[in-house]
Image (cartoon, helix red, strand yellow):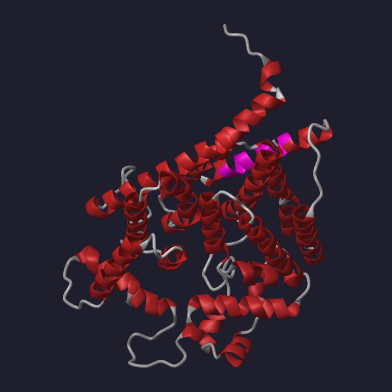
Amino acid sequence: MANINFKNFFNCKNNITSCNLFISTSPALFIIGVAFLEFTIIYSSLIVIYSLLKKKIKVKFNYAIFLLSLFYIIVNLSSFISQDLSSIFKSLAYIRFFLFYLFIINFFNNYYFKLLLKIILFCLLFIYIDIFYQYLTGKDFFGYEPGLYLTRYQGPFGEELISGAYIKKYLFLSLILLLSINKNYLLNIYLLLSIVITFVTGEKMSFILITFVIGIFILSDLKKKKTILLSFISFFIIIFLFLNNPNIENEKLKKTQNRYNKDFKVALGIDISKKSNTKFFSNSVHFIHWATAFELFKQKPFFGHGIKQFRNKCSTVKGITLNNNYNIDLFKGKNYRCTTHPHNFYLELISETGILSLMIIILLYIFYFKRISNLENRNYKISIFLCLLVHIFPIATTGSFFTNHNSFHFWFIISLIEFMHISQLKKINK
């Protein structure tokens, strides 16, 4: 019978190594299930708490630490004021993301960072192949069928229709590797493949945001990216002709066409049975959620209603209020005002945690954009800038800011920016 060495099991260095491996493989763990991300966050938190108690690390107080601490305090104040036990518990437990941030900036290193980039690239290429196979055969490699009446291709995510969101989260980090190879034709193929697959997923907002940010990437250095620009212009001409072709008979192509034509118009509130509709946007489901969130913000502008409270407080906003203030149809306002969250990070923040939390987040974004601008490695600078930009875009439908995977991604991005900054300082001081 093998002897178990408990001393090694509880050794801090061994646990740091194991946790770094979990962080490096987090893009793959995300595909398997969000629970693995939660395990990684808790694991890293425990290591940081132990290290702080044993005085193995010290928290270096700076502007970012101050703002992040203040954000955590305000989130908790909002929940305590709400007097909802569930909200209070969730806000207290949110400290694990701050501890995760401290783990990255103290224990992560270049070896695991390079491993992370390779795993991101591998995972994205695997997802692309899996979704393409699913589109051709009707099932992906794991037997998952397309969702939402065969209009959404989620690949390995099963019932979770988040393949486009996953691509949006990790695509621009993966550019670090492609840019370091310095082969424009590979970068061109990769970006085109990414945008084609995102289009196939049927996730409209992910497709729009990825297209927008890639456009900024191309325009940032137009002289070197002329071939990429021509490729994308050609691709969008094809897409335009495809979406406006009334003679398509293939069922799959027809469903994709409807997803970006009829379904998109319906999502915006346009009545496709009428030739004109001046109230179209105000009757979109997402706008109704946004208007409801803003009305909740007006009720408690400074500290909000507490995290995860939109779902409980949305019914306090009357349909007639939405009709009077936003020209929303009375029936739609009454029946569509409530959901789990308002589908926009910023409106969720002001409705649940108040204007102060939003101001702190904006200050944090400004701080980290400055950090990015000071990076000497151009590949890091471009990629992490695009990664943060696609995350913070304000006029977009999003998941909940406080769900595990969205919070993980936010804290992961800012911790990687700080990690890059610290790594650069270490090189300078050598």
Q: Which quarter of the figure is the C terminus placed in?
A: top right
Q: In this view, does 274 lie to the left or right of 172?
A: left
Q: In this view, does 207 lie above or below 30?
A: below
Q: In this view, does 18 lie to the left or right of 200?
A: right
Q: Is residue 102 above or below residue 281?
A: above
- Expressed as whole percent of the image width and height from the top left, the position of residue 159 reads 42, 53
- Expressed as whole percent of the image width and height from the top left, the position of residue 427 reads 65, 39
Q: In this view, does 278 lie above or below 190?
A: below
Residue 45 occupies quadrant: top right
Asked whether residue 59 appears in the rendered view, the answer is yes
In this view, the residue farthest toward the top is: 1
Q: Magenta stretch: dominant SS?
A: helix
Asked whether residue 148 appears in the rendered view, the answer is no
Please tell me whether residue 42 belongs to the stretch shown in magenta: yes
- Expressed as whole percent of the image width and height from the top left, the position of residue 135 reads 27, 55
Residues drawn in magenta: 37-47
Please tell me whether residue 6 belongs to the stretch shown in magenta: no
Residue 163 occupies quadrant: bottom left
Q: Nearer the viewer, residue 120 or 162?
A: 120
Q: Which of 129 and 273 is in front in this view?
A: 129
> What residue is rendered at 39% in x and 79% in y?
266
Residue 355 occupies quadrant: bottom right
